Every structure is written in structure tokens, then in C-alpha cells.
Amino acid sequence: MATLPPEGRPSPEHIFQTLNAQHQTAVLKTGIELDVFTAIDEGNHLVEQIASSVQAAPRGVRILCDYLTIMGFLAKEHGKYSLSPDAALFLSKRSPAYMGTIANFLGNEAHHKNLARLTEAVRRGGTAGEKGDNLAPNDELWVTFARSMAPLMVPAAMFIAHLVGAHEGEPVRVLDIAAGHGTFGIEIAKQNPQATITAVDWPAVLQVARENADRAGVDGRYETRPGSAFEVDLGEGYDIVLLTNIFHHFDPQTCVRLMKRMHHALNGDGKAVTLEFVPNEDRVTPPAAATFSLQMLIGTDAGDAYTLAEYESMFQKAGFPYNSMHPIPGMPQQVIVSRKR
Amino acid sequence: MATLPPEGRPSPEHIFQTLNAQHQTAVLKTGIELDVFTAIDEGNHLVEQIASSVQAAPRGVRILCDYLTIMGFLAKEHGKYSLSPDAALFLSKRSPAYMGTIANFLGNEAHHKNLARLTEAVRRGGTAGEKGDNLAPNDELWVTFARSMAPLMVPAAMFIAHLVGAHEGEPVRVLDIAAGHGTFGIEIAKQNPQATITAVDWPAVLQVARENADRAGVDGRYETRPGSAFEVDLGEGYDIVLLTNIFHHFDPQTCVRLMKRMHHALNGDGKAVTLEFVPNEDRVTPPAAATFSLQMLIGTDAGDAYTLAEYESMFQKAGFPYNSMHPIPGMPQQVIVSRKR
């Protein structure tokens, strides 16, 4: 997480480093864009070799790779660079777990523009972005999201599939709200041949989900319902609804309204499964969940990283008195499972 | 420095956090702009009190202050925020060591634009900024620098003043190259009533140095020579020349050329005093010095954070065979003292 101030007497160093923290984002994004990780994985270890492979200048590559080394994504010994375990697994295109695409969303220009207006967002108490809260139909940001962020979601998708007992193979009907890339529903369908998935999102986004369902070979059990989760006919009698990374965009009243629709769509024994950043009551721990509220400040009118108590209160108002939280090992997010009875 | 990857098995968390590291810069910059630190120092500890004091929305202030807490600039207990020792000393305007102004330079829009073109800079091996390398006469960036960065330089200025024996009170003539805010020469003049300072920089920048000299009460011993350090008549017979944060902008050949001019300007026993970010030979330690080369990649055509061996080589070519390095305690920079004999 954020660099912590050094122990001992006050020093300007932590302030200086924090004001330069944006360099870290740029360096990793550029490393991914130029694909230096794959180049190194392919056996290029010296500055000149890497520079030639990625078609960049040696001076630029040396400074970039040194910075990546300082951040721990590379190691450097006697002038030779090699990949860290994280970089080998997640940043080399030779790895099946490659997730360099997430830089397209997290390092998105729209996102940066919102961030550049943070002072105004704090004054207003909500996004100061030109485009408002990005919740309009087919906002291209969500297509970028769907095309970029799936790899980061794999551990959570596998965790949720296990949590809802996909491996048990019972016939289940799953409703995937704001499906995006579709990873969460698709993972359940992959593990459970008796599962059918109904995915809801904007039409342009659902196209990405459908491509991913085709690629996973579950397209025969994959239905889509294009439109707003607040307005489209969802159907009913579902065993599971997936609510992944959606509530944080809205104010509590709107969350209750959405959850009431889930209450109607689920059968009596059904489970609503929420994936979210859920900070502790102090709202400053754990860091990864607690800092997420900033993204909602710069990008939405009234969204937030809600605490468990807040989710319980909202979900109870929507008719779900039973809620349990499940942290995902090694990931910054939590899962809340909600039941009517 | 940069967040390090957690020990143990690979996880996407460090990648995710690094791609979001730019949030840290924005949060601290906004905290300084809205002056929440001074507001808290004045006795406002609750969200509503701070929001009212800085005229911002409670939701925005809560999310901002929580993030500042996570980064260690604030503490939060039972919903009440207080300042960390660093924040109390350097970020509250009630403190004489206030240095919030440095956000104006480090968080400068020109700087961000260069950073946004990092990929192109790596390809080229030099700045991809619209304005090139910012070394044109009177570039407004250097006026911003002179007006913003002085507080950060105070520890180094006091260190250098001591190192050159300012407290001994001998009559000395000091030449301050690229004086900027003038802090380094002014500190010597403050400590040594027998010191006279000659400051060289662009005219618009020297105006800032002169204001600071007036304020310090040393204006009677403060002469200015407007122009390029490479072209203006510097005079000669100086006992000390100060070369603070200048060499890193240039290629080695240009550094040698500049240092030869210093050789001419100094008397036989004179000292050239260089303040720089000097990484170790591996170029990846210590972090604060080693990462500085990135700023030179995005902002200059051929500048760098040079190693001690590189400085020794350049300075020897310019006629200074004797060079010694002095780290500044608690600061990321080093001082090199060079002598002709």
C-alpha cells in the first residue's frame, strides 16, 4: 500500500516521495505498454538486448528498468535484469495469468482526468469529471473495463464459484448483474455443467461477456438481458444473483432499491452474492479496501466503499436479514452472501 | 520509497497498488491545496469541522482525510483526525518549516504532461514533452521552482553552509550557479557576515532570489549576474562555487564544459560544491537517488542521476582531481566537494 513515513524524527522525505508517487504508476504502465516483461522473459537481460527487442532507446530502457527494479518488479544483478515472481506470473505475455491489460482501465485517461480534479471533487463531495459519473448506457469506459479487467478477477471468480458450491453440480439458475466481462457467471458455468447464466449489462458490454462465454464453451447456457439493472425485466426464480463491484457506485438508498429487485428475482432459498471493497468500521483499514472510496469520490456522485454494517443495514431494508462476510485470501476484496431466510 | 511486493506467493495486489499509486500524489496535493493540515492544526478534528473550515463537502473531506491517514500524514482515533509529526512540522502553515509549496513544482501540470508521455520518452531516450527540455531562458517552470522549492532545500543548505565553514566567519566570495530561490548562497551569507554572494540564473528567477536575500537581510552582500551559466561573464577569484541541482540536466560533455568554467572562476584553493542525487554504481540504490533519473528522462534530452564515479570522471576532466562525497543525513541527496589541488 502507500509508503509509510520512516520511523524516527520528522523528515520531508515521505512528503517528497508521495508527491512523486505518480511516477510509479507511469513506470509500470509504460513497462506494460512497451512489454519489457515479455522481452526479458524471452531471454533479453541486458539493456541493449531489451531496447532492441522493444524498439526503444537504451537510455530510456535503462532508466525504466532500474525504476521497475526499485519497485520490485525486476531484479538486477551485474547489469542483468530478470523478472520478479509477480512479474513472471502476471506481466509476461508468456504466462496464462497475464494481466497487463488492467493498465488500460486503471491507467485510463478518463480516470486520470477525474483524479486531476480531486480538489474540486472534495469541495463538491462528488465527481468533478466532465462526463459525470460514467453511469450512462454504453459508456465506453465500461467496455474498456470489460475488455481489460477480467484477469484481475479470476481469483475472486474462483472463490465465489466455490462458495456457491458450483463444484457440487446441482442445477442452478444464476443472474449476473452488471456482468461486465462476465467472468463471475462464466466461472460458475465452467465448474457446473448444470448452471445456466443470465447476464445483465449495457448491450456493448454484454458483447464482451458473450465473447468470453463462447471462448469458455458455455455459450449454450448463457443468456443476456441488455439494459439497466434498475429497469430491465430480470426474470425471477433465480438461485443465485451475482452483484460484483456494483453497489459502490451508488448512494445507500439506490443500493437498497437495487437489492429489492434482487429480492424479487431470487427464489426463497436463493443467495445474493456481493463482491466489494469493504473497509473496517474505522474506514482506514485494511488499506486496499479503505482507499477504494477515493475512486468513488473522483468518479461518482455518491458512491462509496461501504462497511459491513452499512451493507447489512441496506440489505436488511431490502429483505435480506442474513448476511455473512467472506474475505478472499490474498485479494483486497470481500464477499457478502445474503439470504432472505 | 515505492511499495515493495509482499513476501510469499505471487499476488496481483502489488501491481494493482502500483497502478493506483498516482492517487497518493493527488491526495497529498489536494490536502495541501485545501489546507486541511492547517485546519486540523487549528483545532478542527471532526469531518464536519474540517469541512466547514476548508469550505468543502463532508463526504469529500472524510474520504480525503481517511486516505491521508492510510498514508500516515494523519492519525484517526474515534473519528477524530490529528496531524502526524511530519504533517505538523512540514504541512501546517502554522509551522515555520511549512513546505506545502513544493506541491506546486512536484505536482506541476507541465511535469504531469511529461510523465504522461513516458512511453514515448523511453522510445526516444529523452523528453517527449511539448516544450522540450525546459532549459530555455526564463522558462516559467524555473520561476515556479524558485518560488516553491526553497523550504525543501533548507536542510541541505544548512549542511552545505557548515561543510564550507561558514560559521568560521572568514571573508569568502561565493558564486551561486543556477541559484533559483537563492537558498544555498543566502544560508552561507546568513551564517557568515564576511561572505559575499554572486548569484547566476535567468533574470526572472533571480528576482525571486533577490527577494529572498532581502528578506534574509543579506541584500547588501548579494550581487546577481543574469544569464546562462554557460555564457554569462562569471567573474573570477571565488572561494566557493555552488552547483546545486544543475548537472543532472545535462549530458556528461556539457557537465565537463560547465565545470571547466568553474575551474576558471575559482581561485587556486577554491572549492566547487555540487548537490546532487547520486545513486550507487548499481543505479537502483538508494531508492530516492536512483529513481531521480526518471525525472531526467521525462524532462531532459540527456540528463541523468550520475554516479560518483561518473562525477569524478567529469570533474577530473575539468581540472578537479580531488573529489569527496558527503551524504546529507535524512535527505535523499549528496554533496560532492571538488578541489583543483
Image: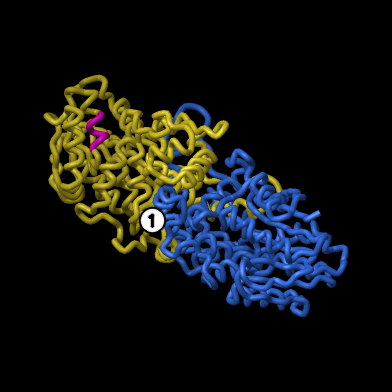
Chain colours: A yellow, B blue
- A48, above or below B297, in the image: above
Q: Which residue occupies the foreground of this view, B50 or B227? A: B227
Say which quarter of the image contains residue B99: bottom right
Whether B3 is among the magenta residues is no
Give the amino acid type for the residue marked by disc 1 in the picture: His
> Residue B22, how many percent across, how many down?
46, 52
Say which quarter of the image contains residue A152: top left
Q: Which residue occupies the foreground of this view, B276 or B78? A: B276
For mark 1, what is the residue?
A112
Q: Chain of mark 1?
A: A
Residue B247 at least partly seen: yes
> Residue A15, how many percent across, how many down?
59, 54
Q: Which residue occupies the foreground of this view, B211 or B92? A: B211
> Helix or strand or loop: what does disc 1 sit on?
helix
- Label 1 neighbour load within 10 Å: few <14, some 14-19, many 20+: some
Q: Main secondary structure of the magenta part?
A: helix
Asked if residue A323 lies left or right of residue B61, the reply is left
Tally the marks.
1
Residue B78 at least partly seen: no
Residue at horizontal 15 percent and vertical 33 percent from the top: A222
The residue segment tinted magenta is A182-187
> Residue B169, how many percent across, how many down?
87, 67
Say which quarter of the image contains residue A16: bottom right
Quadrant assignment for the C terminus of chain A = top left
